Image (spheres, coloured by chain):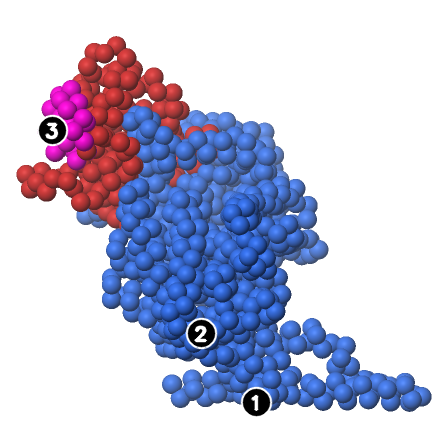
Chain colours: A blue, B red
């Protein structure tokens, strides 16, 4: 097993390195050759059939190849789970970078490919930042914003200042020998290396699953302090340029002001771009295909604009993502939202991979390495120590104001999570060699710090989290009761704050929520999206969708959907079943048997015409069960229907039909649940709903259905119309009198004649004979035949029109609409056991 | 601190309340101020009407229930100690000041908080959240955005999720169990100002 893995590993490596050699070593020769070729080709009189034009594609080709190589590295690394369990992926990617760098070095004897600041800051970093902002858990982020800001701003300044001053002190003390570095340059170095890196931190913390508060603190800090560190770096860079002599109090104050302007200006700009983005997605109804593109373009523009205005680009991009997420997710089509999420992850993950690989590659370069033991070791030591000191002091202050104080263990992990990353390296490379004589020493120290923190601390982090028993994130399942309860808690806290008369956190949040609902939503959200904003309801929706999917996949895995009736559904139903339903039982069973007879033959026609694909899937089933499955598939396997519809509108995306489908699944499931519950609580009738679906309409449909009884499409149209009408059918049924079990009339199917014609009766007999399993689920120990004979009789005693119309579809629905909730009541004895 | 403990003597049973609820003297003083502010006619007790004076509370979907929680059945008035005792449910859980074994269940413990939340639903105080009781709360919170039958199915599903013994209602134990993974200590706590 491991040998296989190794071999595969080796294969891929060979592949990767071969590709690399292809693209690297012949490169130079190729360029020269092609020059010759192009020169000579002008001499040739004939038309060349093919020519080799490397220089035409060189740039993009190399980029694409490098992306491919980096991705391959990740692929190889991720294929070895036992390794990634111990060593974090980021560390392995850096090591892969070392190897690749070694290969290039071996081929070229110099480092042709490096991580340049331009590439890093303009192309690789923005996707990561935007992704972090967009996927930020908003509530958590804003709840802890105060703490995050303190860690990010004060913590970073503390790190920068303490490191710079300590190094300078040690320098003065003579610990590093001869170095041409002044105090300002030390501070510059301190500021560039002060920031915890979001890329490195995320890469490690995502794997260890610490609790969400700790995660958001570390992550939020790392994200924001990147912005801070860039600002600090720029300020000190300006100071260095100015030279020590020129700096007076005014300049320092200017520096401080610039710090705040840059940071807050960047955030504000991001906010503005976020609003712009929301506003744009509000109007993209007709161009849904490129809708996701807006997010990326505007997000990137927010980054570039901030850069242009010399504001903090990172902060701008973060806040752009944070602000827009809620609204664009509501505004955009569900598919677009998914597209954005996935594309975001693809870009971010890809960039991250490339950053780490290139960090490794960049390190293999003789020219940058300057070794100064004192400087490097002291830097490592100070970074480590001051990070802990900073975290402890700040947390001590914060804990006096926090509702839930941060525990000591959490603080340890926070301190230990101070990983430095590519931002520091990017800044280090950006330093001006003319101004800072020891640039190379700083670059190599930065690299060592990055490697040390990412690799060593990254490896230790996981065992440490385990050993310290850090509270891990609860992987809770989505449950409705929890969501409802959370909502109640929110309201409750606001109320308690009101009563106790204080303006606290919850009060502010409530005010903001009101403001948001009143103005922001009105401005930034589509009217249709505004209505679907309820969170609890959305959760409910998701749960129902999940259920529907589970039913289908479960059914597919068993080869039949029979189980739905036999296991889960009936158990569900039985669970609810009280004594009171027993009275109604004979009628229920009568209904059941009645529709057995009527529906089955009627259904035979429409099914084959639905979709070939669906038919194929059913093929494998036994013929006896075939009919059953057809119904269930019709109910659940929405795919078939979608494809069926595709034929008519190939040029359009299926977005809208998809929506209908989702809506439909949802409504059905929901109704079913409701029905089953109602049937359990016999006394409770469905609520009166204002119904736009009038009798006339029903009649119309009835006629239509009679005319083309076999048409599948009309069947579906009908059910859609029905779902729009809410409870109308069952309601009219009620008013018709003599209702026993409203559960049995959720969906209307095609209306069938009331009397059973002989041919139907025959077929019904037949079906009764051939499908015992159906029978088994639907039949209490009473003789089925008796009841069936009873059924028409019962119906004939009823007179109202509306009843006639509603009853039959309802009965029909028994068979047809998937039989989940309303199986017949179990026999009394059994029922007693369930009580 | 000396001045505050001297003014603590204004408050009836001040010291005892501190020990019982875990509020500090400063907290109690502030709450007492608030109590007197709410008690406009200086009767020394609050009535539901006094709470309804708080405008924000009337806009709160569960506001009425919260008010109800302050008034035990067949009691129309609320004195300061009861007021504080109920607010004590919302103190952050943590190391309680009094490590007193005679009070096994402080109000701000997890169970204490949950009991309070449970009572908000359980209006008829039969120890169970019935479907209707849940529905009422849902209706108040979701309101117009969701239709009645959707509400009903949400309520039904929520009950199904929590209902372990299949009696169609949520008992306190089931309630507690269903919220096992929720960080109640955090979600039902506020930081009382001093």
Q: CA distance from mark 1 to mark 2?
A: 22 Å
Q: Residue A666 or A444: which is nearer the viewer? A: A444
Residue B22 located within the stretch drawn in magenta:
yes
Q: Image quarter for residue B120?
A: top left
Task: Name the element at disc 1.
Answer: helix
Whether residue A142 is situated above or below residue A73 in the rendered picture: above
Residue A645 relative to residue B65: left or right: right
Labels 1 and 2 within one chain:
yes
Magenta segment, prevailing SS (helix, strand or loop)? helix
Q: Residue A422 or A228: which is nearer the viewer? A: A228
Residue B38 relative to residue A318: left or right: left
Give x and y (percent) for residue A173.
37, 69
The residue that label 1 is drawn on is A106
Protein chain holding label 2 = A
Q: Residue furthest right?
A: A45
- Numbered disc total: 3
Q: Residue B122 or A130: which is nearer the viewer? A: A130
Task: Name the element at disc 3.
Answer: helix
The residue that label 3 is drawn on is B15
Q: Residue furthest top?
A: B41
Highlighted range, magenta: B1-23
Specify the label residue A448 is tagged with. Answer: 2
Task: Kindly identify the residue that appears in the image at 20 percent across and 16 percent down.
Answer: B45
């Amino acid at each position: 097993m491991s040998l296989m893995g190794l071999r595969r590993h080796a294969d891929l490596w060979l592949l990767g390195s071969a590709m690399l050699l292809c693209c690297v070593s012949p490169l130079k020769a190729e360029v020269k050759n092609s020059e010759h070729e192009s020169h000579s080709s002008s001499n040739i009189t004939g038309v060349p059939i093919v020519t080799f034009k490397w220089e035409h594609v060189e740039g993009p080709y190399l980029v694409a190849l490098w992306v491919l190589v980096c991705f391959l590295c990740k692929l190889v690394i991720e294929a070895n789970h036992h390794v990634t369990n111990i060593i974090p992926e980021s560390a392995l990617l850096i090591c892969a970078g070392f190897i690749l760098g070694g290969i290039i070095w071996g081929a070229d004897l110099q480092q042709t490919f490096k991580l340049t600041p331009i590439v890093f800051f303009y192309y690789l970093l923005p996707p990561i930042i935007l992704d972090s902002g967009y996927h930020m858990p908003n509530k958590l982020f804003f709840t802890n914003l105060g703490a995050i800001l303190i860690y990010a701003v004060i913590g970073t300044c503390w790190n920068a200042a303490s490191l710079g001053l300590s190094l300078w002190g040690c320098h003065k003390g003579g610990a590093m020998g001869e170095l041409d570095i002044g105090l300002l340059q030390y501070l510059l170095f301190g500021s560039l290396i002060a920031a915890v890196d979001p890329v490195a931190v995320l890469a490690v913390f995502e794997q260890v699953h610490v609790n969400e508060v700790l995660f958001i603190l570390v992550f939020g800090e790392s994200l924001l302090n990147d912005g801070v560190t860039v600002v600090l770096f720029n300020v000190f860079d300006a100071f260095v340029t100015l030279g020590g002599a020129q700096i007076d109090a005014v300049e320092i104050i200017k520096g401080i002001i610039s710090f705040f302007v840059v940071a807050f200006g960047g955030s504000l700009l991001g906010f503005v771009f976020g609003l712009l983005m929301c506003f744009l997605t509000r109007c993209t109804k007709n161009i849904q295909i490129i809708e996701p593109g807006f997010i990326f373009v505007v997000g990137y523009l927010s980054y570039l604009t901030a850069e242009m205005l010399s504001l903090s680009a990172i902060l701008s991009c973060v806040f752009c993502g944070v602000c827009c997420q809620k609204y664009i997710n509501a505004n955009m089509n569900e598919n677009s939202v998914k597209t954005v999420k996935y594309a975001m992850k693809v870009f971010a993950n890809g960039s991250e991979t490339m950053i780490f690989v290139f960090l490794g590659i960049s390190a293999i370069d003789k020219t940058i390495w300057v070794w100064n033991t004192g400087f490097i070791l002291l830097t490592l030591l100070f970074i480590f120590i001051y990070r802990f000191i900073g975290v402890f002091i700040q947390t001590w202050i914060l804990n006096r104001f926090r509702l839930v104080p941060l525990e000591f263990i959490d603080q340890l992990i926070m301190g230990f999570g101070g990983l430095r990353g590519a931002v520091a390296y990017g800044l280090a490379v950006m330093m001006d060699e003319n101004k800072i004589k020891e640039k190379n020493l700083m670059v190599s120290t930065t690299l060592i710090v990055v490697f040390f923190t990412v690799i060593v601390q990254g490896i230790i982090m996981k065992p440490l989290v385990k050993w310290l028993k850090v509270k891990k994130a609860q992987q809770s399942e989505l449950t409705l009761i929890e969501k409802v309860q959370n909502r109640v808690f929110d309201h409750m806290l606001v109320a308690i704050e009101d009563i106790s008369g204080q303006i606290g956190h919850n009060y502010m949040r409530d005010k903001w929520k009101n403001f948001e609902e009143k103005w922001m939503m009105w401005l930034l959200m589509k009217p249709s999206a505004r209505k679907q904003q309820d969170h609890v309801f959305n959760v409910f929706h998701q749960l129902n969708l999940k259920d529907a999917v589970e039913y289908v996949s479960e059914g597919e895995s068993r080869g039949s959907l029979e189980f739905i009736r036999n296991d889960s559904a009936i158990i569900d139903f039985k669970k609810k079943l009280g004594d009171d339903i027993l009275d109604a039982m004979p009628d229920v069973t009568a209904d059941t048997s009645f529709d057995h007879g009527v529906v089955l033959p009627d259904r035979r026609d429409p099914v084959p015409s639905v979709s070939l694909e669906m038919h194929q899937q059913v093929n494998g089933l036994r013929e006896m069960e075939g009919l059953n499955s057809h119904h269930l598939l019709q109910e659940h396997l929405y795919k078939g229907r979608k494809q069926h519809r595709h034929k008519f509108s190939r040029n359009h995306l299926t977005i809208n039909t998809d929506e209908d489908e989702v809506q439909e699944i949802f409504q059905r499931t929901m109704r079913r649940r409701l029905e089953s519950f109602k049937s359990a609580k016999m006394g409770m009738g469905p609520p009166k709903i204002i119904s736009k679906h009038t009798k006339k309409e029903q009649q119309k449909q009835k006629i239509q259905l009679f005319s083309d009884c076999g048409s599948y499409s009309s069947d579906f149209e009908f059910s859609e119309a029905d779902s729009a009408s809410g409870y109308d059918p069952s309601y009219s049924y009620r008013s018709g009198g003599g209702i026993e079990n409203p559960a049995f009339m959720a969906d209307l199917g095609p209306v069938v004649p009331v009397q059973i014609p002989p041919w139907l009766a025959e077929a019904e007999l037949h079906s009764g004979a051939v499908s015992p399993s159906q029978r088994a689920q639907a039949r209490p120990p009473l003789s089925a035949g008796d009841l069936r004979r009873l059924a028409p009789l019962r119906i004939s005693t009823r007179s109202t029109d509306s009843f006639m119309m509603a009853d039959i579809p309802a009965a029909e629905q028994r068979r047809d609409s998937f039989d989940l909730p309303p199986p017949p009541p179990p026999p009394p004895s059994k029922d007693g056991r369930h009580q | 601190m000396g001045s505050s403990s001297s003014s603590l003597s204004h408050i009836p049973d001040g010291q005892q309340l501190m020990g019982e609820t875990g509020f500090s003297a400063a907290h109690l003083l502030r709450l007492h101020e608030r109590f007197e502010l709410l008690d406009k006619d200086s009767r020394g007790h609050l009535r539901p009407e006094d709470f309804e004076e708080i405008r924000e509370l009337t806009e709160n979907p569960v506001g009425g229930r919260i008010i109800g929680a302050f008034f035990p059945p067949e009691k129309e008035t609320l004195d300061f100690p009861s007021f504080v005792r109920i607010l004590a449910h919302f103190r952050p859980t943590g190391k309680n000041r009094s490590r007193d074994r005679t009070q096994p269940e402080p109000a701000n413990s997890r169970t204490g908080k949950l009991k309070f939340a449970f009572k908000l639903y359980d209006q008829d105080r039969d120890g169970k959240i019935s479907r209707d009781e849940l529905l009422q709360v849902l209706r108040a919170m979701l309101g117009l955005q969701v239709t009645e039958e959707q509400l009903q199915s949400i309520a039904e599903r929520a009950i199904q999720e929590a209902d372990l013994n299949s009696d169609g209602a949520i008992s306190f134990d089931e309630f507690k169990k269903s919220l096992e993974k929720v960080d109640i200590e955090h979600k039902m706590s506020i930081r009382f100002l001093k």
